[in-house]
Image (tube, helix red, strand yellow):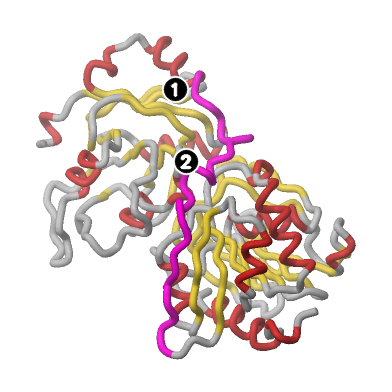
Amino acid sequence: MSLLNAAPAVLVLEDGRTFRGRAYGATGRTTGEIVFTTGMTGYQETLTDPSFHRQIVVQTAPHIGNTGVNDEDDESSGYWVAGYVVRDPARRVSNWRATEGLEERLTRHGIVGISGIDTRAITRHIRDRGAMRAGIFSGEDAALDDAALVALVRDAAPMAGARLVDEVTTSAPYTIPAQGETRFRVVAYDLGIKSATPEQLATRGMEVTVVPASTPFAEVEAMAPDGVFFSNGPGDPATSEHEIEVLRSVLRARIPFFGICFGNQLLGRALGFGTYKLPFGHRGANQPVLDVATGRVEITSQNHGFAVDAPTGEPVTAPQAEFGRVRVSHIGLNDQVVEGLECLDIPAFSVQFHPESAAGPHDSRGLFSRFADMMTAAPASARA
């Protein structure tokens, strides 16, 4: 469809602000939490990241779609965003790997989007007012009265208090074989996992069994894994009581643990710390993070709207004292948010960012090797 001939569309925020443009992708209506991502590329990975489930994503980069999409770079089996907002969609695809145009892919998956609006103004508004509910309405729905559209947006469920893991997790376990010799066997909880993550584990000799979020610890224990991994995922970590109790059992059993993103938040809660909703979150492939131990600054890929409330500085005894001492290992340099946790008396650590970096820089991929080193130091046969 030519953008000039696209149906009218309107983006409506819950505080009443509206932006009018043209339909991009499927025509219709959608609601969700509106957030922005600062990555200049990687839109296919963004669209297929389950952590974006029930969110309307604004691309801050103005020109989107020039490389099209292909059949290899999806990070999951679905397109999870609730809606998509771009300023200047590419008029043609120009990449030898492309198998389809971005708008065609969005239309085929029923993703309602809007184009031709000032995404910089939207981003500044979210930055100042915070992430909020929003809706995209196109075609006949765009002609509805603004007050009616705002009412539809305000009827949508907020992200705080939302349990979404059950909607994105795998329905059955599956195994990713190790590349080369199998050195370790890892159980990975799918809380919204991206395909690049088990691939990174597999390249380091780990056979990865990916299991549903509802899997009880007894089943994990029966597998006698060398390590347990918790993935990224959507929603409010405070709603994940089952996963937190599983993780506490993992920590008590001294099974080496590594978590990323949502997994970092769940480690924080398992240790007894709280979590809280950030004003507008961190999303994009250009987020600077300080590794406290080394002083090294890494540019990271991130996608989260919640964070762990833990003290930075010297190690402290975890509020759940049975787990011993813990320290904040990484700090976000834009706003000093906790970006990683390290347990000092049990084999467990986590980071808030995405070291699988799909898409994004590869600064932090060494964390997967650190997990392997932890399992080498604490083999299953030596655990009590």
Left or right: 222 in relation to 325: left
- Which SS class for mark 2? strand
- Span shown in magenta: 155-180
Q: Badge 2: how crowded within 10 Å, few (<14), some, or many (20+)?
A: many
| Residue picked out by circle 2 | 35
Q: Which of these two is toward me, 130 or 325?
A: 325
Q: Is residue 222 magenta?
A: no
Q: Main secondary structure of the magenta part?
A: loop
Mark with earlier residue (2, 1): 1
CA gap between label 2 and label 1 equals 15 Å
Residue 43 horizontal/vertical position (percent)? 33, 54
Q: Which residue corresponds to the image point at 75% horizontal and 51% vertical from the top-left?
A: 309
Q: Which residue corresponds to the image point at 57% horizontal and 68% vertical from the top-left?
A: 187
| Residue picked out by circle 1 | 17
Residue 27 horizontal/vertical position (percent)? 23, 28
Q: Which residue corresponds to the image point at 56% horizontal and 43% vertical from the top-left?
A: 235
| Residue depth check, mark 2 versus mark 1: number of the one nearer the observer | 2
Residue 286 horizontal/vertical position (percent)? 47, 62
Q: Which residue corresponds to the image point at 34% horizontal and 47% vertical from the top-left?
A: 79
Q: In the image, is residue 14 above or below residue 82?
A: above
Task: Tell me the kind of residue under disc 2.
Answer: Val
Q: Which of these two is toward me, 186 or 101?
A: 186
